[in-house]
Image (spheres, rainbow, N blue to C red):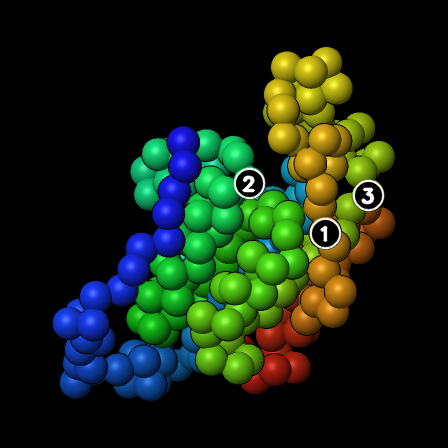
Amino acid sequence: MTTETPVKDENVVWHQHAIDKAFRSQLKKQKPVVLWFTGLSGAGKSTVAGALETRLANSGYHTYLLDGDNVRHGLCSDLGFSEQDRRENIRRIGELAKLMADAGLIVLSAFISPHRAERQLVREMLPQGEFLEVFVNTSLDVCEQRDPKGLYKKARAGEISNFTGIDSEYQEPLNPEIDLLAGEKNIEALVDDCLAALQERGIIG
């Protein structure tokens, strides 16, 4: 399947409502942010993001976790895994994450998002400081040993094509705001690293 970038109609104008992001953030007593977890399949993106969301929610923060597999059941169910469809997948998620941040939420997005340009596209959708790239830094060897869904085995056998890390490129972040050594630390330590980074930036107290 192929997708095309829609042309914006000049008659479609953004409507500014009375209740804005600043009001919703004040109401929730938190700063909105998009935490963009990126890394290879099996790196631990969803696991770390889920554990972090649990810690944040239990502390009274308002969050939402966007997971790569989950959004393909609905919002992106019409997309395949070609380079073009994967770009469109990330664009849609970026737009959704932007709306959720506008609602004052702490948004956790867990996607392979293999290309720097795509992650930069999402970063540019948001105001300065509201996009934090979280690199779940796990080596290909470790990810392949874990292989929780058996996908690496299928990719090596040629049953899956365009699989990131095998026959499709993954571009590591050059300057992520948070670099998680996920192949060396346990989940609790990784969550602590994330919380410390959020506290340092004044996003949480």
Q: CA distance from mark 3 to mark 1?
A: 13 Å
Q: Position of residue 180 (x, y in %)?
A: 74, 58
Mark number, residue 83? 2
Which of discs 2 and 3 lies nearer the camera? The answer is 2
Q: Is residue 164 above or below residue 155?
A: below
Q: Which comes sooner in the sequence, label 3 or label 1?
A: 3
Residue 155 in view (yes/no): yes
Q: Is residue 148 above or below residue 86?
A: above
Tag 1 near tag 2, CB within 8 Å:
no
Q: Amino acid at mark 3?
A: Ser
Residue 47 at x, y = what percent?
A: 60, 45
Q: Is residue 134 above or below residue 42?
A: below
N-terminal of the pair, mark 1 or mark 2, is: 2
Q: Which numbered tag is attached to residue 51?
A: none
Please identify the quadrant where the C terminus is shown: bottom right
Where disc 3 sits, the SS reads loop
Which residue was labeled with disc 3? 139
